[in-house]
Amino acid sequence: MLKTVPSKEFHSTKPMKNDASSPGITETAPASTLSSVRKACRILKAIAGSSEARLTSIAQDTGLDKATILRLVDMLAAEGFVVRDAGSKLFGLGPEACGIGAAAIARTDIAAVARPSMLRLAAEFEDTVMVMVPSSCYAVCVGVELGSFALRANYLAAGGRRPLAVSAGSMALLATLPHAEYEAVMPTVRQLIAPYPRLNDALIDTMTRETRQRGYAMSIDLLIERVGSIGVAVVDAQQHPLFSLSIAALSERIVGRRPALVQALQREADICRQAWAVAVGEPRD
């Protein structure tokens, strides 16, 4: 829906901060003395920290024997925290783990990390800038900055959500997921796109492939006539998507300025990546 709205600044609610007083987990205890909970935590951390988590590598990273790992992984898989690709035999984080990750990310105040980039992009292109985070099979909008262009493509407010693959911001997140996570969410995603008549399985597959090849996602006239969006994912040190930066505008404003939009979005994604590393204490590039 296209509408003319008065100029205003959108302020998102500041998330709660982490409790710095919580004690850390000691990693030096022998594997034989660890509780099942701590063993499961070690397994999850090993899977999260590797792009190719296999049974052998998990055993090396955790110090646990393979039988114990398989027993605990079966339990974690039953609860949706771990998935295993039948072909490659690689382990990945399941949708429940992704949902918890999204909640943890929210506490790091993504709005504060992304806001300078949102302001620059809105000023440079005069269109709506959005920030979205992955949450299970959805992308949740956590920040919006309205541009000064008279007709604004502002069809998703902070707090709103869309299935992954619906809009450029959510497609950028979907296409950046590790293979095992992608395979885990896609059956549900394919069901969730049913209310969107211009989307179908074949188109989603094509858009995912194109997004991976060119490094950005683009959606033109797929949700609202004459409205489009273009977006990129901001990733962590393991190349897992943290959030996306996207610009929504009239379709002709997206298509006609695509090279400039892509360059600016990728520039700001790099800046956000460095800001995130500082915020969470990751090594910087």
Image: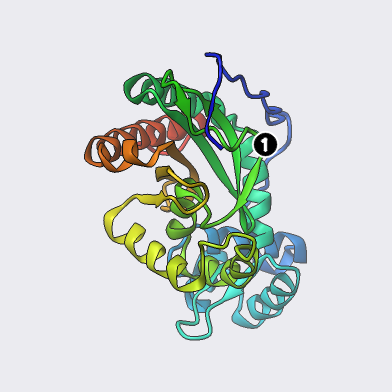
Question: Is residue 91 depicted above or below 227 in this figure?
Answer: below
In the rendered image, residue 273, in percent from the top left (x then y), is placed at 40, 37
Instruction: Name the image quarter holding the C terminus.
Output: top left
Q: Is residue 214 left or right of residue 250?
A: left
Instruction: Name the image quarter holding the N terminus.
Output: top right
In the rendered image, residue 265, in percent from the top left (x then y), is placed at 33, 36
Which residue: 65% across, 80% down?
70
Given the current orientation, which residue lies at the most extreme left position? 259
Q: Quadrant of residue 245?
A: top left
Residue 209 appearing in the image: yes
Counting every numbered tag in the picture gives 1
Between 50 and 270, the one nearer to me in the picture: 270
Which residue: 46% across, 31% down?
129
Q: Quadrant of residue 71?
A: bottom right
Which residue: 40% across, 23% down?
122
Residue 35 appearing in the image: no
Question: Is residue 63 depicted above or below 27 in this figure?
Answer: below
Between 36 and 195, the one nearer to me in the picture: 195
Between 37 and 32, the one nearer to me in the picture: 37
Disc 1: CA contacts within 10 A as few (<14), some (14-19) or many (>=20): few
Which residue: 70% across, 68% down?
80
Question: Is residue 147 depicted above or below 195 in this figure?
Answer: above
Secondary element at tag 1: loop
Q: Is residue 224 left or right of residue 163?
A: left
Residue to which mark 1 is pinned: 159
Which colour assignment does the render follow? Answer: rainbow
Q: What's the amino acid at mark 1?
A: Gly
Q: Quadrant of residue 191?
A: bottom right
Question: Is residue 201 depicted above or below 228 in this figure?
Answer: below
In the rendered image, residue 200, in percent from the top left (x then y), is placed at 51, 69
Between 91 and 57, the one nearer to me in the picture: 91
